[in-house]
Image: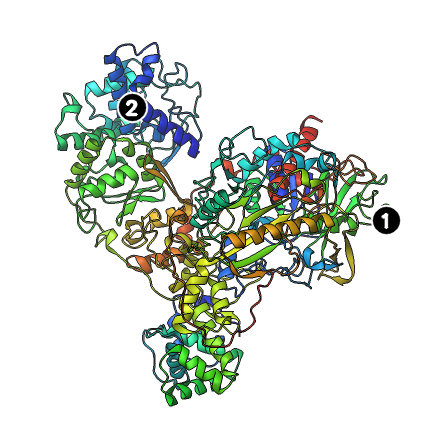
Amino acid sequence: MRLMRRDVLLTTGMSALAVLGGGPAVFAQGATPSPSVPAVDPDLMRFMDISHCLTDRTALNAAIGAALYAGIVQATPQRRGQIQALYDLKARERLITASELAKAAEKADKTLKDAVHDIMIAWYRGVAGGKVVVYRSALMFDITKDAIYPKTYAAGGPFYWTTKPPEVARPTGLPALSPSPFVVEPT
Amino acid sequence: MPSDQNLSADVVIVGSGVAGSSIANELARAGISVIVLEAGPRVDRQHFVENFRNLENKPSYQGPFPSTPWAPHPPNQRSPNKYLHTSGPDAEAYQQAYLRVMGGTTWHWAGCAWRYLPSDFELKTRYGQGRDWALKYDDLEPFYYQAEVMMGVCGPDPGVEDLGSPRKQPYPMEALPLSYAGQEFRKLIAEKTPWRIVHEPQARNTRPYDGRPTCEGHNNCMPICPIGAMYNGSYSVYHAEAAGATFIPNAVVYKIERDAANKKVVAVHYYDPDKGSHRVSGKYFVIAAHCIETAKLMLLSADEQSPNGVANSSGHVGRNMMDHTGVQVTFISGDKALWPGRGPLETNVIDNFRDGDWRNERGAYLVHMVDDNQVDFATQLAIAKGFVGRELEEQIRYLASHTVRLFSHNEALPDPENRLTLSTTEKDALGIPHPQVYYKLPQYTVRSCDHTRSVFRQLIHLMHGTDEEWTPGYFPQDHPAGSTIMGVDPKDSVVDGHCRTHDHENLFIASSSVFSTVGTGNITLTVAAIALRVADTLKKELLHG
Amino acid sequence: MADSKYLVGSILLGSALLSGLFTEQAYAEDAQQAALMARGAYLATAGDCVACHTRPGGKPFAGGLEIATPKGVVVSTNITPDPQNGIGTYTQEDFEKALRRGLRKDGAYLYPVMPYVSYAGLTDQDVKALYTWFMHGVQPVADKPPETQMAFPGNIRMSMMAWNMLAESEKPETGDSATYDKLRRGRYLATALEHCGTCHTPRNFMLVEQQDQYLAGSQLNGWFAPNITSSSTGGIGDWSEDDLVAYLKTGHAKGRSQAAGPMGEAVEHSTSHLTEADLHALAAFIKQVPAHDDAVEHQARDSFGQAAVEPDLRSGVVNRVDNQPDYSGAELYDANCAACHGVNGAGTADQYVPSLFANSVVGAGRSDNLIMTILEGVNRSTPSGHASMPAFGAHSDVQRLSDRDVARLVNYLTDRFGSGDHHVTAEQVGAARPRPSTPATPSDATKPVSAHAP
């Protein structure tokens, strides 16, 4: 059952779109790369919709989304229903921004906060169900790419690091969700 | 390989890390026959690079190296861990990480290539603490240089930045330029404190060297340099093999056999992964199997002749366990964006606390501002704080550019009560007992760590830091030392000044396990230097003896 | 090895540019003599004598380099002024015969690996300058390289007489070569000195350069010296004169190609030390060499490919240290190449690490140079800097790739960034691997296991 990564990585990543919901093993079966999203899976469609909302982004990579969704629901099956709930909440209350949806979700049902966390971790860290789905293509590197490279993928050449990186203004935005514990673990 | 085959060489070495492989290379080049027995398998860089990228917990330096059942190594530094069992009041401070693979633990080091200070070798004489080594800095100086050339070490011009360890030759390569974060930190330290930042000497290429490329700042020295710009022991394995040395992977040595008089070692015995046993005889033997495994093997070889273990008439095998126990704090700077993580991991050091009269009462230490990419950390922190969407992205950029992490290497002292023994309950797949260590931090080290905390608090204040997170307790720096301690008196030490065991005239130990004190700089260059000195001794005895 | 190359480079450069160096020596007392010496040194650099007449790690011009030819290995000779082992007893006439006619002092014929058919084009004045420099500017070395043992068509040197009748030599140029106009100077540099045709012109079965296909490309020890005629499909018709100058000067023309292997050495030892005027002259001449279309290349080699943009979808599986996965070409690229050449193949912004698309080595229809670059790496020092890519062959410290892995990687690279999957096989890679060189073979003295009976 173990996924053979050579069947997935880079070349056939798009194939993840073809099949959904069965966990990582499905990737190996989809052999034909497909450039467009088959708009057939309503679960995936809802996941992408709330992902756009929770990232405040209009463009997200559909192939990555499909793989993230598969990883999330495989690790935690109740996420499927929670994503449905988030989708319904967003539609019902006509929520537009990530903050609006996240606030409303936690207010409506405390357990939805975990689903929002999972979706944030998936898109921004590239991790779903505790496993790496994408590394360098995670959004956290997209939003910092003017300053820094993902480890092992530095493309600046020797001594690029001596130059001055961009200044970053102190953010003024507020958190939408209640804080959660975060511990720096020894390695 | 059939179990009954007799293998033999002039010199048999246990362990293929920086110590074992560099000795093998020197001897083979001199025409001496060498067999090196490595418990772990042959490995490839590309495999570890991909493992790293597939690893969820990126800061786990052991993570990309899941071990084999026959040569287990610690899976992580968490307590309890499944291999190196620790106990005692400071058990969590001795969760060492190391690798059992061809080439050894330098597959994941940061390349920091410090020489010890002359005072580190005479702590007892100068400060009345710990012990003196049975050798002096000057004995090691030529071998330090040989090790620097072998590894390819870059470092500052001693005329401009004297690191306190006298040099007869300049560093083989020019110092690595500091990152913007390092430059800003250096300015702050110079302007606002009585201390200084120095360029850390590093086994890292600042120009193409030995067929390997210039560092390109992938910021991944640990756990795996993706391009080979940093030295690791596998290069010395390759060089030794090209010179004619034989390396046998997956060869788990479990017994050291002596002659009837118990004066000379005649063979070592190893298991293959299927537990087939093999005997390897030789004229000289070198145990170079990392501080933990070296002591484990000596104890494991106990028999009627040596009921306490080989080379252990002093009872000091497995005692005097030391490390650079560290203090670590992470905080958010209130000053301008530093964006740590551009360039190699560890490049700048505050070296003012490496030596001083105060060493009569508290341990020395050095301070790194670790230049680690904080994007993943920032993302996890910002999500935990409750941010989503656009606000989350702003937070990630801010936190990743303003997170500062400081850590220290604090000096331990050799205390015989800090002791490695064999587990009576836990065994590996071959039935070999796991190592276990009792550890209580010396008060000397505790006082040193207290001093470090006060310095860190001053630095946090200077950088207008907030959200400080102190890593709980004391954490290990993976620099274990002392388990087969060096000394002039056979009654309280295991090896002499040439790393020859007091008990067995043809048995040498090349490892940080012989260190009599642990100083402050990372231990690897000193391990390499003493190993090259062992090679020099062996060459003299085999070729001219 | 790198050190010795650097040393050679410094000596050449030093003697070419700093003629003052010689004023301290007893011989070069007057300015005229010094000028002649400087001219000789520069010509020796332009003729790249050192490339063949120095073995790796050896003293400059002391010979001993093994040069593989389709007919066997030729060992280069000592051309230092040592009287016993070198050319110390050569008169200027002896020197001229060897240089322009392939005749040794003892009357024996030289093997045509020595490009005397090219050097035949040298002017008398330049022969004299070269002679003067070799006799007085080169350190004598008392080393005797081993004699060449080869089965040349007829393995006796006498058969070279017949070969020489087949081979067409350059006609000696006349006058002062320093005063030629640009194209004439360029031609002189290309033919009589740099001997570009020695590698880039195909040879017939008798190893004679086929002058009707001048610079149309030829095999070279696993490498392929490509078609550099002005053909816009098979050659380098799309390169500007400045592109060529940049390439010859630094070994790298951005977005076009970079030099490795034998061409890397030619750039390192020779062309990177030419004057700006000579570089332009040489480039201008090459640009007007008649176009020859190519049997394999049908589109400019540097015109293929674009940045890759796929996300890095992964398994998240971390494999045990001894469980090395069977990597695909894409994974091999990710694991071994992407760290420097970038996830998209674009290299670094300044092209210190070159882009893999718009790159002749990847875009070429022949995979030879791509395979050899992966196996042997790049190590090219010029006054503009040190270009270095680690080898991935059998002696690499960074990563040793199997024949199968190299084949998969090459096919991925040509498919993704070049003209399409080349379907290179592991066997082809195995055949291209350099034969084990001397240092890799341990001597009997160091054979370990059976050295001692227990």
Q: Nearer the viewer, residue C340 or C146?
A: C340
Q: For mark 1, does the 10 Å Cα neighbourhood hold few (<14), some (14 to 19), or many (20 or more) residues?
A: few
The answer to which image quadrant residue C329 occupies is: bottom left
Q: CA distance from mark 1 to mark 2?
A: 74 Å
| Disc number for residue B506 | none
Dot 2: chain letter: C
| Disc number for residue C16 | 2
Amino acid under disc 2 = Ala
Label 2 residue SS: helix
Callouts 1 and 2 in the same chain:
no
Q: Nearer the viewer, residue C16 or C404?
A: C16
The residue at 30%/21% (across/down) is: C18
Image x and y of residue C395, in percent: 48, 44
Q: Extreme left residue here?
A: C181
Q: Extreme bottom residue here?
A: A92
Is B227 positioned to the left or the right of C350 in the image? right
Image x and y of residue B49, in percent: 49, 57
Q: Is residue C127 above or below residue B54?
A: above
Residue with the mark numbered 1: B307
Q: Looking at the figure, which quarter contains the C terminus of chain B?
A: top right
Q: Is residue A11 above or below residue C200?
A: below
Q: Extreme right residue here?
A: B304
The answer to which image quadrant residue C198 occupies is: top left
Q: Nearer the viewer, residue B210 or A4?
A: B210
Dot 1: chain letter: B
Residue B261 appearing in the image:
yes
Q: Is residue A114 above or below residue C157?
A: below
Image x and y of residue B159, in percent: 50, 30
The residue at 72%/40% (across/down) is: B360
Image x and y of residue A35, in percent: 32, 73
Amino acid under disc 1 = Pro
